[in-house]
Image (cartoon, rainbow, N blue to C red):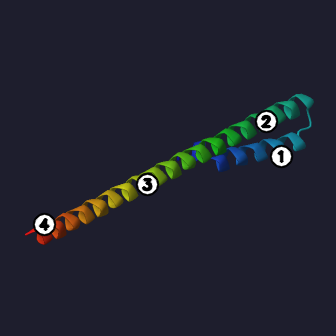
Amino acid sequence: MPMHQSYEFYTARAKESAAAAKAAKLDNVRERELRAEKTWRGLAEQARSVAEQRDKIVREKERARAAEEAEECAAEREAASDARDAEEAAGRSS
């Protein structure tokens, strides 16, 4: 993920805005920086949420892929077992 869209980036900007608000001498500058901090924190939370959702989707796909592979292996074992049973039955009937 590009740095400009990461949780860490947004959090750093929020901290900078909070520090600027604390240091501001003028009310309008303080208010502007507090609004900026709130916006940056919202963006940070959104980035975190998106990253968590993306990770969840990846985990779900991996689980589905593993389950599919397990089903394929079970089907192959069953087919091999059926083939052995058929060979044994053919050998007994000859």
User: How far across and how far down the image is residue 76, in percent?
Assistant: 28, 60
Between the residue at mark 4 and the residue at mark 1, the CA separation in whole angstroms equals 84 Å
The residue shown at (78%, 47%) is: 15
Please identify, in this view, whether the residue under mark 4 or under mark 3 is nearer the observer.
4
Q: Nearer the viewer, mark 4 or mark 2?
A: 4
Identify which amino acid the numbered label 3 is placed on. Answer: Ala
- Provide the residue designation for mark 2: 38
Secondary structure of the residue carrying numbered label 3: helix
Taking depth in this image into account, of 80 and 13 the one nearest to the observer is: 80
First in sequence: mark 4 vs mark 1:
1
Precedes in sequence: disc 1 or disc 2? 1
Q: Where is residue 28 in the image (x, y as percent from the top left)?
A: 88, 28
Residue under pointer 4: 90
Q: Nearer the viewer, residue 26 or 68?
A: 68
Q: How far apart are marks 4 and 3 (CA)?
A: 34 Å
Q: Distance between the residues labelled 2 and 3?
A: 43 Å
- Residue sitting farthest toward the front: 93
- Mark sitting earlier along the chain (4/3): 3
Residue 2 visible in the snapshot = no
The crowding category of the residue bearing disc 2, from other C-alpha atoms within 10 Å (few below 14, some 14 to 19, many at least 20), is some
